Structure formats: structure tokens, C-alpha cells
Amino acid sequence: MDRYERVEKPRNETPISENEIRITTQGKMRNYITYAISLIQDKGSEEIVLKAMGRAINKTVAIVEIVKRRIAGLHQITTIGSTDITDSWKPLEEGLVPLETTRHVSLICITLSTKELDKDSTGYQAPLPPDQVKQSGEFDYDGGDSLRFLKV
């Protein structure tokens, strides 16, 4: 593929609602965690939705688990799926034909809510017991994407 250049297609992105967080592999976990907690506690959102594709899925699950252990009483619904993404490539040398490649990418959408969600939903998880929820002062960031628990 060194003789081809990827063609950027215009994206028809759907607008992101205020309570939606799209997780990427480049973003810092602590920023996502802080933003999610502020949406629920400071801005009074009853529900937040975290979405991710591909390699960002494991980061999203970790973020959700941390948020659930910081805020008591959060109900969760997880949905998974997949989509096909088609990339177009134009040749850099004469005589080559343009190419299109299709990738099959996994998706995850996790909804956290202070209100009770549909318990009959396949991806429903009840809130954690109160003894498993720690207050914000009991966590410490090491500056990277990992989290340390302080012994209290």
C-alpha cells in the first residue's frame, strides 16, 4: 500500500448530544472519567451514553467501571454491534487503479443512568452495592492512563 494514498471522504457525522461521550484510542482516560462524572453530578444529567469503536472498546469498558465505582446507584445497559467501513485509496504512480477496502469494525454503546432502566434488556446491569462504591478522594491518578487505589 506504499504506492497508494488514502482518500479522505467527507463525513456526514450525526450531531453529538450533550450527554453523549465518544471514546477514542487517543483520548486520556482521566479526561473521559472527569467529564462523565461532571455530567452526572454537576450538570444533573440523568443519563450518559458512552460510545466507542474498535480498539477503543476496552478503554470504554474500563471508564464505565470506574465511573460506576465513583457514583452510587448507576444502572447500565450495554449494546454491541458492528459496522463496515470502506476506505478509498488513490494511486501515487501511473498505471495503478484506485482501490477500495472494507473493514468490519465492532461497536459498543453503554448507557449509564441514575434512573432505573429496562431490566428486561439483554445488556442490563443493576447498580453496584453501596459498599463497592468509593468516593472521589479514594482514587489517585498517576498522570497516565492508569489508576491507583489509595488505601484508606
Image (cartoon, grey):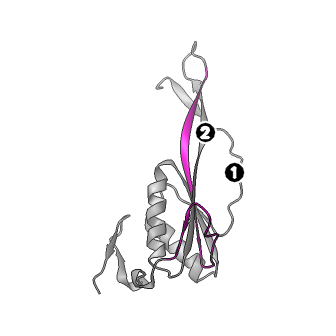
- In the rendered image, the residue lying farthest to the bottom is 152
Q: Is residue 33 left or right of residue 41?
A: left
Between marks 1 and 2 in the image, the one whose residue lies nearer the viewer: 2
Is 78 located above or below residue 126 in the figure? Answer: above
Residue 147 location (% of width, % of height): 35, 70
Residue 49 location (% of width, % of height): 61, 65
Q: Residue at x 44, y 76 (%)?
A: 69
Q: Earlier in the sequence, mark 1 or mark 2?
A: 1
- Provide the secondary structure element on which disc 2 rests: strand
- Provide the secondary structure element on which disc 1 rests: loop
Is 57 located above or below residue 5 in the figure? Answer: below
Q: Residue at x 55, y 36 (%)?
A: 103
7 magenta-colored: no
Measure the alpha-carbon separation of dots 1 and 2. 15 Å
Q: Quadrant of residue 99?
A: top right
Q: Quadrant of residue 142?
A: bottom left
Q: Residue at x 30, y 80 (%)?
A: 150
Residue 119 location (% of width, % of height): 61, 70
Q: Residue at x 47, y 77 (%)?
A: 128
Bounds of the magenta segment = 98-127
Quarter occupied by the C terminus: bottom left
- Mark sitting on residue 85: none
**Residue picked out by circle 2:** 84
Residue 145 location (% of width, % of height): 38, 64
Q: Amino acid at mark 1?
A: Glu
- In the rendered image, the residue lying farthest to the front is 120
Q: Amino acid at mark 2?
A: Asp
Is 101 located above or below residue 19 in the figure? Answer: above
116 magenta-colored: yes
**Residue picked out by circle 1:** 13
Q: Quadrant of residue 9?
A: top right
